[in-house]
Image (cartoon, rainbow, N blue to C red):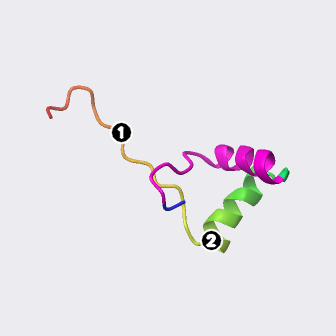
Amino acid sequence: MNEPSGFQSYGQIQEWLKSELGLSLAHKTVYEIVRFLLGTKLKLPRPQSTKQQE
């Protein structure tokens, strides 16, 4: 979770859990584990306008 090459969505976490650990969990369950048990949330940058100057 803390690495820059982490997960972009809870769906990706679901897929990883299924492929690596064989766990089939509901979206809500994955969200609750990440958010409350691990104490973190997904970090995504704000979108930037294509018209914005560099």
The answer to which quarter of the image holds residue 41 is: bottom right
Residue type of the residue flagged with mark 2: Leu
Residue 15, given in percent of the width and then of the height, sits at 73, 43
Residue appearing at x 85%, y 51% in the figure: 22
**Neighbour class for label 2 at 10 Å: few (<14), some, many (≥20)?**
few
Report, in whole angstroms, how far the alpha carbon at label 1 lies from the one at label 2: 26 Å
Q: Is residue 50 magenta?
A: no
Q: Can you give x and y, in whole percent of width and height, for residue 54 in the image?
A: 15, 34
Of the two numbered discs 1 and 2 on the same chain, state the one appearing first in sequence.
Answer: 2
Rendered residue at 80%/47% (across/down)? 18
Q: Is residue 48 left or right of residue 23?
A: left
Which residue in the protein does label 1 denote? 47
Q: Secondary structure at mark 2?
A: loop
- Who is closer to the viewer here, 36 or 38? 38
Q: Is residue 25 above or below residue 52?
A: below
Does the magenta stretch mainly form a helix, a strand or a loop? Answer: helix
Which residue range is magenta in the image?
3-21
Q: Which mark is residue 4?
A: none
Location of the N terminus (image quadrant) = bottom right
Residue that numbered label 2 is attached to: 38
Extreme-left residue of the structure: 53
Residue 33: horizontal and vertical position, in percent?
Answer: 70, 66
Towards the viewer: 31 or 18:
18
Q: At 27% across and 32% down in the image, what residue appears?
A: 49
Amino acid type of disc 1? Answer: Pro
Q: Nearer the viewer, mark 1 or mark 2?
A: 2
Q: Residue at x 38, y 47 (%)?
A: 45
